[in-house]
Image (cartoon, grey):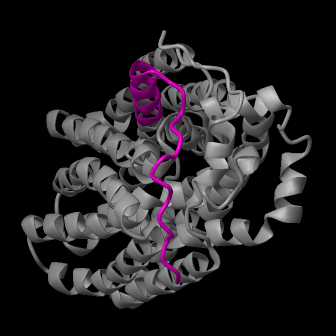
């Protein structure tokens, strides 16, 4: 693994006002936070609500497997969003894509909130749930690439790790909001009331959140880099074909680097909900609060990790954190076995710190694998394809492994394999080259107003 060569001291910054830069950072952060609120509400509900509402079974294990299978559908559908919206981001611009993806996820999540259960409409209930989950995944698949480029292409390319981390804060922020809402509802409602109608309130809130996100995004110009691409007539005619024909190694590197962090996140934010209630005998609200605390720590640790990766070699930081996550997964199941809520909370927090040290630099590492004219397509495809092999099947595999072995060793071993794939991806990848951005930013690029 090579070290990054120092960039020239007189590099260019995007020709934007401070106000526009702050808007871009806020839009990237709030947009992905809102979308991941929608996604995280579903993730949490798939563990604690959907088995009984949409997949009734005399065997709780079977119902949980079915619920987690619908969780995986949201990942499987992501490549469609990455394919469709990623190429549009390179052809039409970052902004229109981000507005559309926000609407797709918001509408799908709202409809889940009003969807009747199995007891009311029978088999149609889980079928419609899967279709809406599929739509959520398509929206998220198109969202991430655009959100990352929005903040990173407005920001100084020499601080790409920090600026692109704005979108990376979205998942823990959304997870924090979602689990907070569910924890509050479970605390103030009876078990019957929560399963009957209470959980729906968390989904219906998405209408308000999406409205706020749209307000911010509609006021933004497109990024300086894309405006420069347009001005030069350099937008690709067939970006997907070009990525696969000329950027295959960068694409493979970007896909593999995501698998370890995805599986780590699934372990400490999704599977722990089942592990804490079934294996440790804790109350649902206690486990939700533990995940909530871990997510709160990530609001700080992710941007710090992104900023740190601007100061030291990004791939090295990423690799060390990946190894740390694998080691900690073995320790986690040893120290939490038969322990208290406090120990579980500490275990989740430390697991998510290792995740942050990978996830903070991840966006910058992925987008800098591709040239500016192919970034939206390449980044979106890498993000969504990796999700299928990483986060999509991880909760399902964790549940099956634990049910059959009764031990966390197999789960930790599964994570270790995922980390090994990430290390291969990092070895295949390249370090940052800010000169690619500077070529566009120092050319005849339209100046973005501060309005």
* In the image: residue 316, left or right of residue 78: left
Question: Where does the image place residue 274, in percent across and percent down from the top left?
Answer: 33, 64
Q: Residue at x 11, y 65 (%)?
A: 341
* In the image: residue 89, left or right of residue 202: right
- 9 in magenta: yes
* Residue closest to the eye, 320 or 75: 320
Q: Residue at x 18, y 51 (%)?
A: 289
Residue bounds of the magenta highlight = 1-29
**Residue 448 picture quarter:** top right
Q: Is residue 141 visible?
A: no
Farthest top residue in view: 451
Question: Where does the image place residue 63, in percent across and percent down from the top left?
Answer: 49, 61
* In the image: residue 425, left or right of residue 404: right
* Residue closest to the eye, 36 or 154: 154
* In the image: residue 3, left or right of residue 256: left
Question: Where does the image place residue 51, in percent across and percent down from the top left?
Answer: 45, 54
How many marks the image carries: the answer is 0
Q: Is residue 417 visible?
A: yes
Q: Compared to 389, does 112 lie above or below?
A: above
- 14 in magenta: yes
**Residue 111 picture quarter:** top right
* Residue closest to the eye, 242 or 298: 242
Q: Compared to 141, does 121 lie above or below?
A: above
Question: Where does the image place residue 238, in percent across and percent down from the top left?
Answer: 91, 45
Q: Compared to 112, does 74 lie above or below?
A: below
Q: Residue at x 48, y 80 (%)?
A: 419
């Amino acid at each position: 693994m090579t070290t990054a060569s120092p960039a020239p001291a007189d590099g260019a910054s995007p020709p934007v006002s401070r106000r526009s830069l702050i808007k871009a950072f806020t839009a990237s952060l709030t947009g992905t936070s809102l979308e991941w609120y929608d996604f995280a509400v579903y993730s949490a509900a798939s563990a604690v609500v959907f088995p009984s509402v949409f997949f009734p079974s005399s065997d709780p294990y079977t119902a949980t497997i079915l619920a987690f299978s619908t969780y995986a559908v949201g990942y499987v559908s992501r490549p469609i969003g990455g394919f469709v919206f990623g190429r549009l981001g390179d052809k039409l611009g970052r902004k229109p894509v981000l507005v559309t993806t926000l609407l797709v996820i918001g509408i799908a999540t709202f409809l889940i909130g009003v969807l009747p259960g199995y007891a009311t409409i029978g088999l149609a209930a889980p079928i419609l749930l899967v279709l809406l989950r599929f739509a959520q995944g398509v929206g998220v698949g198109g969202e991430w690439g655009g959100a990352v480029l929005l903040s990173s292409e407005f920001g100084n390319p020499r601080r790409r790790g920090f600026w692109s981390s704005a979108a990376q804060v979205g998942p823990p922020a959304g997870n924090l909001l979602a689990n907070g809402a569910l924890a509050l509802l479970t605390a103030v409602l009876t078990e019957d009331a929560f399963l009957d109608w209470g959980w729906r309130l968390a989904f219906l809130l998405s209408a308000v959140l999406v409205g706020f996100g749209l307000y911010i995004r509609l006021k933004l110009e497109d990024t300086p880099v894309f405006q420069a691409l347009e001005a030069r007539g350099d937008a690709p005619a067939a970006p997907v074909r070009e990525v696969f024909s000329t950027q295959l190694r960068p694409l493979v590197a970007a896909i593999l680097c995501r698998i370890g962090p995805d599986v780590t996140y699934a372990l400490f934010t999704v599977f722990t909900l089942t592990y804490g209630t079934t294996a440790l005998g804790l109350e649902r609200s206690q486990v939700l609060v533990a995940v909530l605390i871990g997510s709160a720590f990530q609001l700080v640790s992710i941007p710090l990790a992104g900023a740190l990766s601007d100061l030291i070699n990004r791939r090295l930081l990423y690799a060390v954190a990946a190894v740390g996550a694998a080691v900690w997964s073995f320790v986690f199941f040893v120290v939490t076995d038969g322990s208290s809520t406090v120990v579980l909370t500490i275990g989740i927090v430390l697991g998510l710190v290792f995740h942050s040290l990978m996830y903070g630099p991840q966006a910058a590492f992925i987008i800098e694998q591709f040239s500016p004219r192919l970034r939206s397509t390449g980044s979106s495809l890498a993000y969504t394809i990796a999700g299928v092999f990483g986060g999509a099947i991880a909760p399902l595999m964790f549940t099956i492994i634990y049910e059959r072995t009764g031990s966390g060793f197999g789960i930790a071993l599964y994570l270790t394999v995922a980390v090994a794939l990430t290390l291969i991806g990092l070895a295949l990848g390249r370090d940052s080259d800010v000169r690619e951005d500077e070529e566009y930013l120092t050319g005849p690029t339209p100046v973005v107003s501060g309005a």
